[in-house]
Image (tube, rainbow, N blue to C red):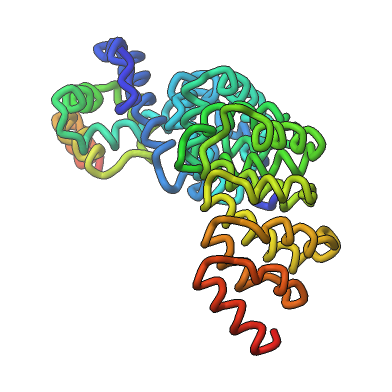
Amino acid sequence: MYDASLGYDNAIDTTTEKGLLNALSWFGITTLIRSSNLFKDSRFSKIIFNQYVVDTYSEILTDPDNLSGICHKAAHSGIDLYRHPIWNKFLDTQFEAGLKNDNIIYQALRNSDNYMNYLLHWKKDVDWMEIYNLYFEKQKFHSYVTVPFVNTLNKYFEHNPICARISIEADLFEAESKPDSNVRTEMYIAYIKSGFLDRKKARKIRSESSEYASMKAVSFLMEFAEANPKLYPNIDELLLQFSDTKYDSVQEVIAYHAPYRILCAFVGFESKRAKKILEERMQNGK
Amino acid sequence: MSENSKEHQNEIQVLSDEQVVYLLAGLGINYCVNAYDPKLKEISDRFSKLNLKIVFNMWDSIDDRAKIKIINSNAEKLKAWINSYSEQE
């Protein structure tokens, strides 16, 4: 009988005084959590940070849309809801339940504003390997790569680089059924960013079945290595792995951005545009 | 913890459970009096006939439209009270 759109349990008997107050308070809590002033109006804050509210209206508060709305407003008001003692336990319970719910994980992956993503941001003890694996399972064959997936991928490398390296290498270079090319592109970028790329793996990126993924990876590699020379002192050697790439767009991006000192290695490029760029750069001496 | 969080932390539990229910019911009636749904209209009609002692607890959190509804619904009592007040003067 629960109507989530109204936040009102139709089963409540409104003919009694108690029932009427009960029904009105249900409308009230729904109005409150949907208000843009939830954390800006002190009257509303007093209500939302009340144990009675969290205990009594948990059915409304646990609705994923409602909870996401509350987290969104808290975050935009600079409030770390997870650190409030009253909300901490409640949010922990919701987080644990969310991890076990396929539908919630799917929603969290598709929507940055989902409460799970706010909790991932607020919580300090996140098992990023677990989150990555959950998100990856839902993301790997979809060409639209979502922001939460990319954030999780980066967090995985940041917090657990060794495991991240092993699992990403397995999925990118060894798996029989590889992720979608757009997903691979983001994985290459995160992998390169973490400093793990070596000659052998660069060669594999050169042999990528997707021209776009190969081009984006090499383009990011050149840009990143220039900004972080200590991480890739062997950038020349890595770029040389692409000297026999068959992809025009890869040839062009290398011709345009590769360091001048190794341009000679790419004279064999067949793309007319790449050839023209190389000629111009060699003539100009830069 | 941010300043905002500290500020809100200080506000925790300053309201009793009863106060919370009245505040929420006040927000709820503000929603119902502005709704077109017959069910909600029925609820707001029932509210206007509530014991005035209960309405008193919600008075500060309800909108003028809801207040007018209560006044209209209790017009006779109000007139009698005004009358007795004038007689005392």
Left or right of A52 on screen, residue A84: right
Q: Is residue A244 above or below residue B86?
A: below
Question: Picture coordinates of residue A89 (x, y %)?
Answer: 66, 24
Please report the residue visible at 35 percent of the width from the left and 25 percent of the height from the top: A7
Q: Nearer the viewer, residue A246 or A10?
A: A246
Question: Picture coordinates of residue B66 (x, y %)?
Answer: 24, 37
Left or right of A8 on screen, residue A176: right
Q: Is residue A50 above or below residue A77?
A: above
Please report the residue visible at 52 percent of the width from the left and 45 percent of the height from the top: A182
Please report the residue visible at 54 percent of the width from the left and 57 percent of the height from the top: A247
Residue A135, image quadrant:
top right
Left or right of A150 on screen, residue A43: left
Q: Is residue B14 above or below residue A193?
A: above
Please report the residue visible at 54 percent of the width from the left and 24 percent of the height from the top: A54
Question: Picture coordinates of residue B65 (x, y %)?
Answer: 22, 42
Residue A21 showing in the rendered view: yes
Quarter of the image for the C terminus of chain B: give it: top left
Left or right of A286 on screen, residue A213: left
Residue A70 showing in the rendered view: no
Q: How many marks?
A: 0
Question: Picture coordinates of residue B36 (x, y %)?
Answer: 15, 33
Q: Nearer the viewer, residue A235 or A153?
A: A235
